Image (tube, helix red, strand yellow):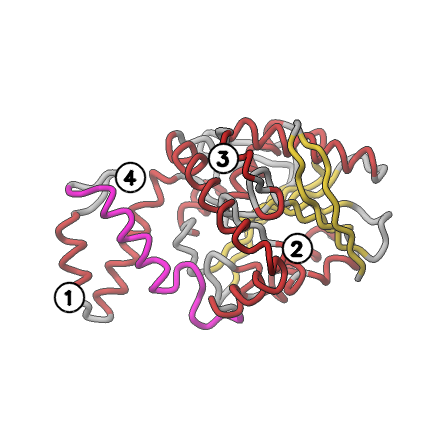
Amino acid sequence: MQEKKFYIDVNGSKQNILVLYEELSNPILLIVHGGPGSPDRPLVRRYNSSFTKYFTVVCWDQRGAGLSFIEANTKEKLTIDLMLSDLKELVLYFIREYHQDKIYLAGHSWGAYLGLRFTKLYPQYIKYYIGTGQGISSFADEIEKYNFVLQEATAKRDEKVIGKLQHFGTPVGMTYPNDTEQARAFVGKLVHKYGGYIHPNSNLNMRKYISLYLQCYSKHILQVLRGINYSVQFLNPEINKEDKISEITSLDVPILLISGERDFVCPVQTTKRWFENLQAPFKKFVVIENAAHMVNFEQPDAWNQAVIQTLKD
């Protein structure tokens, strides 16, 4: 595997690109990272490099994230429309510079939110859309998260957690009867603790996760952390404001969705319900065992094979 790292100008912003490849003539697979603001190139290099046999893999540090974060970013308000515009410019760059007619687009978590909205807007540029940890609706997700945490706390006989959940009450949409902001933060923290983010039986853990970031970004790690804080500050409230993904009922390109069986960051139950009603030329949903929200890195062999086999078929 070979790699190239470089900056390109995207709508007036210098953004960093990592290209992993064996043959640059292979089809482009653009991976849109999660977060917001959490670049995934350390994980892609470690766990998904087998793709380079079939694709030219593009890892993009988005505006305000990773090596694309600069101090000037903090004077700029990030919006989803701006991120969609950046993604369009990036796709057109690789279509033009690498002599492609269309590309393959893969998004994870926030990247799946952005990628799916982009695919709906610009199907003429996309051969196939692959969504992993595909969030659908923050409004529908909260009850799934709450019930998961309550079930786990009950099984563990954690009376302190049960008491807190009873105080907050059962959510309706994203609103709890008591202390909504505190309740959402508490439930989100427990989703991670109880394995809804990284499955306890998976190949990944936080120690490996952090180690790979430190190896990849080394002296730039503070830049990466600042980018995460900056991106979350602006983009998360906008994501939660409207149910934009729920409004998508059809796509004009084939779609593959992959979820970990225990994903409760973007609960797999909500994703399945949306997917069942989606109209598309071809659609496939894969659930991988012993994995949660980070399924593409928790069970990389199974995830890689699901993607490669589907795209080859």
Q: Which residues are magenta?
A: 178-203
Percent across and percent down for residue 153 are 23, 64
First in residue order: circle 4 vs circle 1: 1
Crowding near pointer 2: few (<14 within 10 Å), some, many (20+)?
some
Q: CA distance from mark 4 to mark 1?
A: 24 Å
Q: CA distance from mark 3 to mark 4?
A: 28 Å
Crowding near pointer 1: few (<14 within 10 Å), some, many (20+)?
few
Which marked residue is nearer to the observer: mark 3 or mark 1? 3
Q: Is residue 159 above or below residue 229?
A: below
Residue placed at 57% from the left, 61% from the top? 213
Can residue 8 be seen in this snapshot? Answer: yes
Residue placed at 16% from the left, 64% from the top? 160
Q: Answer with left or right where residue 4 lies relative to residue 35.
A: right
SS state under label 2: helix
First in residue order: circle 4 vs circle 2: 4
Q: Amino acid at mark 4?
A: Met
Residue placed at 37% from the left, 40% from the top? 138
**Mark 4 lies on residue:** 174
Which marked residue is nearer to the observer: mark 4 or mark 2? 4
Q: Nearer the viewer, residue 87 or 278?
A: 87
**Mark 1 lies on residue:** 159
Q: Is residue 158 above or below residue 89?
A: below
Q: Amino acid at mark 2?
A: Val
Q: Are marks 2 and 3 in contact (CB under 8 Å)?
A: no
Q: Are marks 3 and 1 in contact (CB under 8 Å)?
A: no
Residue placed at 60% from the left, 58% from the top? 219
Which marked residue is nearer to the observer: mark 1 or mark 2? 1
First in residue order: circle 3 vs circle 4: 3
Q: Amino acid at mark 1?
A: Glu
The picture quadrant where one finds residue 30 is top right
**Mark 2 lies on residue:** 307
